[in-house]
C-alpha cells in the first residue's frame, strides 16, 4: 500500500513531516528549531522558535519534491532577510560540521591507501571541497548576499545582476564522481571496507543536500531578487 503523503501545511504536525521524510531533520538547526516539540503543528513550532513558517514550508517542499516550484504569490509571503539567514546557516553547517566530519573519517582511508591511491583520493576531495567553498563562502557571501542586502535597503547598483548567479553555479559533479570511483571501484577490497561504505554514504548525503541547496537558490532566491530588481526605480 502506498503511504499517503503528509501535506505541507501550517497545521500539519511537524513530527509527521519529519517521519515522512527524514532528510528534513537536517533543516531544523538552520531555522533555529530544536527537538522535543511534541505534537505541535508546523506553525506552532515555527512561532515558538521565531522562524518564518512560510519559508520553512517552502524549503521543506523543495527538499521533498525536486519538481516543486513556488509561484510569485507564495514567494512574496516570505522574508528575504529570513531566506538569507537560512542560507548562511546552511553554509555554516556545511563548512563547520559536514566537511570536518567527512575529513576525519576520510583521513583514515587516505592513510591506509598508501602512495598508489592516497594522494589521488586526497586531491579529488580537496578539489571538491574548494569548489564548494569558492561558491558558497566567497562568491555568495561576499558578492551575492551584499548585493541583495543593498537592494533590500533600496540601493540599486549596475555592477551586478542576479541573472549572473545562475552562470556561477559551479558544476562539481565530475570531481565528485572521480572521488566516488576511487572509494567504491578502485581501492583494494581489504582497505577499510566498512569505513569506505560509511564515508561514501556521508559524501552522497552531502552532495544531495548541496543539490537541494542549489534548488532553493534557483527556485526561491533568484526569482525573488528578480522581483526586487524590477521593483526598484
Image (spheres, rainbow, N blue to C red):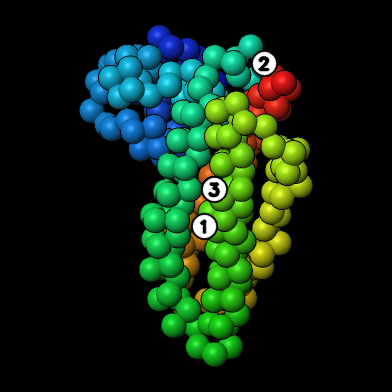
Name the residue tied to disc 3. Answer: 141
Answer left or right for 162 relative to 77.
Answer: right
Name the residue tied to disc 2. Answer: 72
Closer to us: 202 or 146: 146
Q: Nearer the viewer, mark 2 or mark 3?
A: 3
Q: Earlier in the sequence, mark 1 or mark 2?
A: 2
Q: Residue at x 43, y 18 (%)?
A: 53
Task: Give percent across and percent down for residue 173.
Answer: 68, 57
Disc 2 to disc 3, C-alpha distance: 25 Å
Task: Give percent across and percent down for residue 41.
Answer: 34, 14
Q: Residue at x 67, y 32 (%)?
A: 156
Disc 1 to disc 3, C-alpha distance: 23 Å
Q: What numbered label is drawn on residue 46?
A: none
* 90 to 12, vertically: above or below: below
Q: Which of marks 1 and 3 is in front?
A: 3
Task: Give percent across and percent down for residue 110.
Answer: 48, 79
Residue 87 at least partly seen: yes
Question: Label 2: how many residues lie within 10 Å, few (<14), some (14-19) or many (20+)?
Answer: few
Closer to us: 223 or 207: 223
Tell whether label 2 touches label 1 (CB within 8 Å).
Answer: no
Q: In which quarter of the image is residue 22?
A: top left
Q: Is mark 3 on a helix, strand or loop?
A: helix
Q: Quadrant of residue 127?
A: bottom right
Q: What numbered label is drawn on residue 203?
A: 1
Disc 1 to disc 2, C-alpha distance: 34 Å
Question: Label 3: how many residues lie within 10 Å, few (<14), some (14-19) or many (20+)?
Answer: some
Q: Is mark 1 on a helix, strand or loop?
A: helix
Closer to us: 94 or 144: 144
Tell whether label 3 touches label 2 (CB within 8 Å).
Answer: no
Amino acid at each position: 500500500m502506498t503511504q499517503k503523503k503528509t501535506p505541507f501545511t501550517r497545521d500539519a504536525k511537524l513530527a509527521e513531516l519529519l517521519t515522512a521524510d527524514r532528510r528534513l531533520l537536517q533543516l531544523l538547526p538552520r531555522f533555529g528549531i530544536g527537538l522535543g516539540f511534541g505534537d505541535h503543528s508546523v506553525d506552532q513550532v515555527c512561532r515558538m522558535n521565531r522562524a518564518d513558517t512560510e519559508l520553512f514550508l517552502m524549503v521543506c517542499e523543495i527538499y521533498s519534491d525536486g519538481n516543486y516550484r513556488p509561484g510569485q504569490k507564495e514567494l512574496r509571503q516570505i522574508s528575504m532577510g529570513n531566506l538569507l539567514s537560512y542560507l548562511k546557516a546552511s553554509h555554516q553547517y556545511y563548512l563547520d560540521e559536514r566537511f570536518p566530519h567527512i575529513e576525519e573519517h576520510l583521513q583514515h582511508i587516505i592513510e591506509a591507501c598508501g602512495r598508489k591511491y592516497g594522494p589521488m583520493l586526497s586531491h579529488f576531495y580537496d578539489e571538491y571541497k574548494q569548489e564548494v567553498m569558492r561558491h558558497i563562502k566567497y562568491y555568495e557571501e561576499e558578492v551575492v548576499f551584499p548585493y541583495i542586502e543593498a537592494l533590500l535597503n533600496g540601493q540599486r547598483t549596475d555592477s551586478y545582476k542576479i541573472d549572473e548567479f545562475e552562470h556561477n553555479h559551479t558544476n562539481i559533479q565530475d570531481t565528485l564522481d572521480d572521488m566516488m570511483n576511487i572509494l567504491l571501484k578502485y581501492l583494494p577490497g581489504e582497505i577499510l571496507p566498512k569505513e569506505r561504505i560509511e564515508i561514501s554514504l556521508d559524501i552522497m548525503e552531502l552532495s544531495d543536500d548541496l543539490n537541494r541547496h542549489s534548488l532553493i537558490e534557483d527556485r526561491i532566491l533568484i526569482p525573488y531578487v528578480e522581483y526586487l530588481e524590477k521593483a526598484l526605480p
